[in-house]
Amino acid sequence: MGSLGRVTATRLVVSCTLALALFGASRVLAVTDNPQAQAALDNAQATWDREENDQALQLFEGVVNDFPETEQASMALAMIGLWWKEDGDQAQAFETWYRVLQEYPGSEGHAEAWALIGGTAAEEGDYAKALVYWDMVIRNFLGTWQEARARFWRAGFRWEVQKEYDRAARDYLRVVELAPRDPMATEAELLIGYHCLLMGDIANSLAWCDRLVTEHPDAAQVPEALYRRGYCKGAMGDVEGGLADVEQAATIAQGWLKVNALLLAGSFYGQLGQQKEARARWQAVLDLPEAEFPQLRAEALYLIGESYFPERRYSEARPWFERVLSEYPSAHCAPLAEQSLGAIPYLESAPKGGS
């Protein structure tokens, strides 16, 4: 899971009317909120979402021309810059964003332009520049939705690039405080739990995952929260409780998360001494399309082989280790499979009751 992949200058626009209702009026009194302008901005955004790009550009320009002294005009101009960026003309995009900064200082569009400049820099790998712009949004638009998003993006940098998990978690916490009803906040809750886990704070990680599952049962992040809550429960000794969570996650998740949930469920069954059930979960990983997740498929093969050892069924373990070495020789678990394979002749010749 990586949040820097989400640091993208996209078409996500908060309603100026909603932002004002949540956070208060603009700092520039000459710039006002206008319901007619908001309707026009919403129409332009909806048109762009339908990929009617040329028409959307005309509608954004219409907002700027028809309602020049409004918050919506500042936001429309920021979106025009993004339109040019997506059209491949980055120079025109930056020219438009700088125009927002000059003509609408302190407006919602001003914050949006700074955020988009920062997001574009992050896309290009220039995180130092991105941080400058996100920090300016945070300092100059305290208590706004734009602050929340800038903190969300900055947290991704602190996590994935700087490895400063505690500072990243504090940024995510501020996102939750600022915009608790925004889907971004639900993602932030999941990431706080994940960062607690990275810092070794399993109890707090469990608490955040439990909060997400309990308070946002329909959120898209619930499958991953269930998986992580299950992991935490197992790490704290509640293997059966952890198993229930990861089994549920495996049922509703897709992709890498489903595979990891199946692997962890198998491990929990193994801890409970239910090797047959464990093998069934790992076999389910192998039943998925072969091209997907080769490292995890190799791990499933290795774990199936290992599951026969407690039952002293060494001849049945051998082919699974051989498959790891033949099909995935560069997998992380290949050296372990080779060791286990080499141990089988000694284990088979050991007296009954020996180790």
Image (cartoon, rainbow, N blue to C red):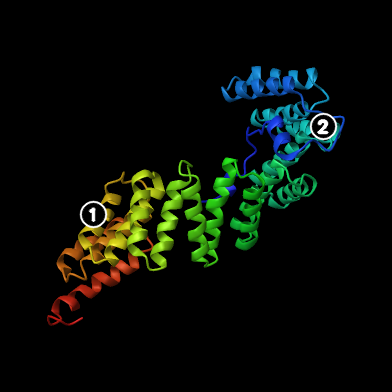
> In front here: 337 or 55?
55
User: Is residue 92 shown left or right of residue 52?
Assistant: right
The quarter of the rendered structure image containing the C terminus is bottom left
Q: Quadrant of residue 307?
A: bottom left
Question: Which x, y percent locates residue 146?
Answer: 71, 42
- Secondary structure under tag 1 reads helix
> In front here: 258 or 214?
214
- Which circle marks residue 289 in the picture? none
Q: Which residue is at 79% across, 35% downward?
A: 25
User: Is residue 221 shown left or right of residue 252?
Assistant: right
Residue labelled with disc 1: 280
Residue labelled with disc 2: 99
Answer whether residue 183 is visible to the viewer in this image.
yes
Give the amino acid type for the residue marked by disc 2 in the picture: Arg
Answer whether residue 325 is visible to the viewer in this image.
no
Name the mark nearer the viewer: 2 or 1: 1
